[in-house]
Image (cartoon, grey):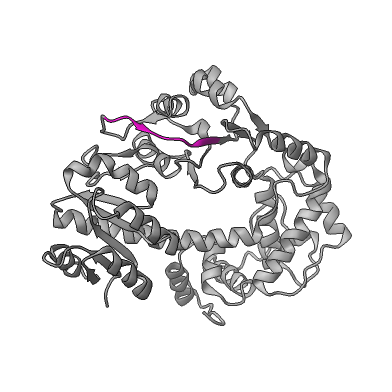
Amino acid sequence: MAMGKILVVEGDQNDRHTRLVRAEGYEAIQVDNLVKAEQAFALDRPDLVLLDRNLGEGGALEFIQRLRGMDAEVPILLLLDPEFIPRASEAVRCGAEQFLSKPVDPPALAVVLGRIFERAQERKRNLAEENRKVRFAVSPFFGTSAAVQRLEEQVTRVVVLDRPVLIQGETGVGKSALARWIHNHSPRKGNAFVELNCAGLGKEMLESDLFGHEKGAFTGAVVTKPGLLEIAHRGTIFMDEIGDMDLAVQPKILKAIEERQYRHMGGTEDRTVDARLIAASHKNLQQLVTEGSFRSDLYYRIGGLPILVPPLRERREDIVPLANYFLSRFASEWRCGDLELPLATAKTLERHDWPGNIRELKNALERAIIYRQGNVLQPTDFQLGTAGPRPEAEADVSLTLAEVEAHHIQRVLEACGGRVDEAARRLDISRSSLYQRMQRLGPKPKRV
């Protein structure tokens, strides 16, 4: 079985790239001009387009844009003669995934194709998760508390200003959702919203992801790669946990904000970018400046429009309405009937401080659904203050660890209606790992 279907656009007297593609195990559809390419694309819906066209000939950029209008997700790999490489950023902005310089090295092409298909699969998985998030999306201004009303008033004032925004707040308050809301209501809403989490990324990885790199810039850089700044051109780039950004990268992002210029890693050419920066951090950036781990000039540049998202404990009157909102979504997704919060449970939720904020509330609701005895959720179903087993299960010290694991997997499978994909996601393990555990421990899915 072919690993994927590739539309190869190259001259009829030269099928070199078609042969290379087939030699790597892909199905190849070859056409020799852009008109046939559009027809084949509409008819065959390939997984990738390999375009052997230079940017000065035959409307290649317009062709890429037309393909993007037909399918916004299909990867497009562009093959260019060396003299056209300086114009490659135009193709990236029009929608090309990546480009290679001709003559193409067969091993390099194999690596690039493999990575593009791998990223495409990852995009599909992320899209499925994003669709789930959309179904569960809640307005960043959900609720009637004074704190939320103040937040909405403040955000409404800054949303149309084309300047950097700094969102601060504790973990789990919804900084990412607020950043996306700002983009979707700004003049840039028709362009890309690109998200980068700076936490845990080393200097090289962060710089490569953000600015892109030239071939040979570091070990493993086998091709030139555009950065997220290029993708965010004319749109918005959201840099979450910017307080964790490596000090060596900070002056480069400052230059990109102030001068709208940057360079690829290993590159010598200044590139231009027009993107609005929205930054977020749960850390106190002023304190980081004092400690010397965050540049003061960058802080003053991004901190001109600060927004503080209130923690859940400062808007307690919103807790129960939020819980009911999420319960209705979970009940629909899990098909477990209507779920109710009696008065005693509602009071328990209101009294809890929720250090993990909205994220913790959602996790507690998921856990309560798994451990519930009926559709009326009791305070004990929430296990507030612990992510461990129910008290009555905890008391049974005669159980082995394998029996406890089997019992928990069975409960999660039941809560998910036997759907293995959903159970694996909630257990934070892969589908194959869950099947291995079920074979070893005994739980069987009702349906898959």
Q: Residue at x 88, y 59 (%)?
A: 343
- Give the side of residue 387 with respect to residue 419, left or right: right
Q: Is residue 447 magenta?
A: no
Q: Is residue 273 magenta?
A: yes
Q: Quadrant of residue 331?
A: bottom right
Residue 21 vertical position relative to residue 192 in the rendered view, above or below? below
Q: Is residue 71 visible?
A: no
Q: Position of residue 274 (x, y in %)?
A: 46, 35
Q: Residue at x 42, y 39 (%)?
A: 229
Q: Position of residue 10 (x, y in %)?
A: 19, 62
Q: Is residue 258 visible?
A: yes
- Give the side of residue 303 with respect to residue 73, left or right: right
Q: Residue at x 67, y 50 (%)?
A: 360
Residue 297 vertical position relative to residue 234 in the rendered view, above or below? above
Residue bounds of the magenta highlight: 269-278
Name the image quarter holding the N terminus.
Answer: bottom left
Camera-side residue of 387 and 174: 174
Q: Position of residue 180 (x, y in %)?
A: 59, 46
Q: Quadrant of residue 281?
A: top right
Q: Quadrant of residue 259?
A: top left
Q: Residue at x 26, y 33 (%)?
A: 267
- Give the side of residue 359 with respect to residue 250, left or right: right
Among all residues in the image, which is located at the extreme right?
343
